[in-house]
Image (spheres, rainbow, N blue to C red):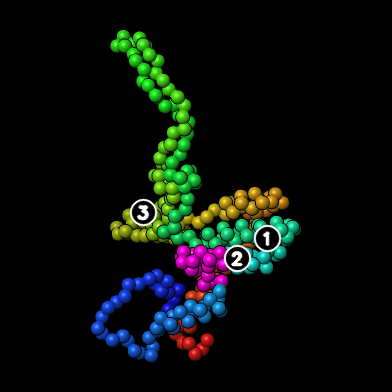
């Protein structure tokens, strides 16, 4: 059993009423066995299991736990980065926490993810001051104005064009629409059959990553001791390592779950 197939055990299922007897094979995993396997994974690879369940939205507590463990990992490694080593302890903790939060958000993204619309800030409506006609006025056919039009400036809400009023936008790549592949026009014309290749915009991921500049702007709001150039050169590799650490720990948790569910005696 892998982590993805274990998701179904986290959701309620309706009872199956049947007169046939259940499987009695010793190789069949029961619900108790599966729960024991989950407990073993949480004990052995707590970070990886919490990161996966937090990414899938199964538990907010696991998400916070994963960010906390990722912050601890970052604190153990941050002194290797000169720009972070020179910061005061309090500022250093805040900076690593910010980087850990953004790293986990980037790790949790997929083509099915949605994010808050930046243009309307999740409201779906954009308010702006515009002239509102209270009375059109009266104008004769010869053009003489009898009563002037009554126009007042008010806050008027308009539908956000970027999210179409939803307040959120999809994280899927705009070129491949989340598929990760696109049609290679040159090869298609040359071979006469549709030829697909990895999408250049998203590098085959199917979704757009969170720009590192967003995390750096949040860091700059906490401290001015790190310049933008330093963030790009020295802190960015550290930030990328935090993202990769989440993926490495998830791989460990997946391997542990497979091992536990395949042979209970060896663990």
User: Circle 2 sits on which residue?
Assistant: 68
Dot 1: what SS?
A: helix
Front in this rendered view, residue 242 or 98: 98
First in sequence, mark 1 or 3: give its number: 1
Q: Nearer the viewer, residue 137 or 95?
A: 137
- The residue at 31%/11% (across/down) is 140
Residue 167 picture location, percent across and down: 44, 47
CB atoms of marks 2 and 1 within 8 Å: no
**Residue 54 colored magenta?**
yes
Residue 262, by quadrant, is bottom left
User: Nearer the viewer's eye, disc 2 or disc 3?
Assistant: 2
Image position, residue 38 (x, y; %) = 48, 78
Q: Secondary structure at mark 2?
A: helix
Residue at numbered disc 1: 93
Please state which of residues 70 and 62 is positioned toward the viewer in this rendering.
62
Vertical order, 179 against 16 (above or below): above
Crowd class of label 1 (few under 14; some 14 to 19; many from 20; radius 10 Å): some
The magenta segment is 47-66
In x, y percent, where is residue 151?
A: 43, 22
Work out how far the residue at label 1 is from the one at label 3, CA to CA, in angstroms: 49 Å
Q: Exactly how many numbered labels are in the figure?
A: 3
Question: Which of the two discs, 2 and 3, labels the residue nearer the N terminus?
Answer: 2
- Going 38% across and 71% down the picture, which residue do you hit? 12
């Amino acid at each position: 059993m892998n982590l993805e197939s274990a998701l179904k055990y986290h959701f309620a299922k309706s009872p199956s009423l049947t007169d046939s007897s259940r499987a009695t094979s010793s190789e069949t995993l029961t619900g108790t066995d599966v729960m024991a396997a989950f407990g073993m994974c949480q004990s052995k690879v707590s970070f990886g299991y919490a990161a996966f369940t937090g990414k899938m939205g199964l538990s907010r507590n696991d998400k916070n736990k994963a960010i906390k463990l990722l912050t601890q990992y970052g604190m153990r490694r941050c002194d290797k980065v000169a720009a972070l080593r020179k910061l005061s302890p309090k500022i250093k903790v805040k900076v690593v926490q910010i980087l850990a939060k953004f790293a986990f958000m980037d790790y949790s993204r997929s083509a099915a993810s949605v994010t808050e619309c930046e243009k309307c800030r999740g409201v779906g409506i954009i308010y702006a001051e515009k002239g509102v006609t209270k009375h059109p006025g009266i104008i004769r056919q010869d053009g003489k104005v009898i009563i002037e039009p009554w126009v007042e400036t008010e806050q008027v809400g308009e539908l956000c064009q970027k999210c179409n009023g939803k307040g959120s936008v999809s994280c899927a790549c705009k070129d491949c629409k989340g598929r990760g592949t696109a049609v290679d026009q040159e090869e298609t014309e040359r071979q006469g059959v549709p030829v697909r290749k990895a999408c250049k915009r998203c590098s085959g991921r199917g979704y757009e990553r969170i720009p590192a500049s967003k995390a750096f702007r949040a860091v700059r709001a906490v401290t001015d001791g790190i310049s933008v150039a330093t963030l790009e050169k020295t802190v960015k590799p550290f930030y990328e390592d935090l993202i990769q650490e989440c993926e490495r720990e998830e791989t460990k948790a997946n391997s542990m779950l497979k091992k536990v569910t395949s042979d209970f005696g060896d663990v």
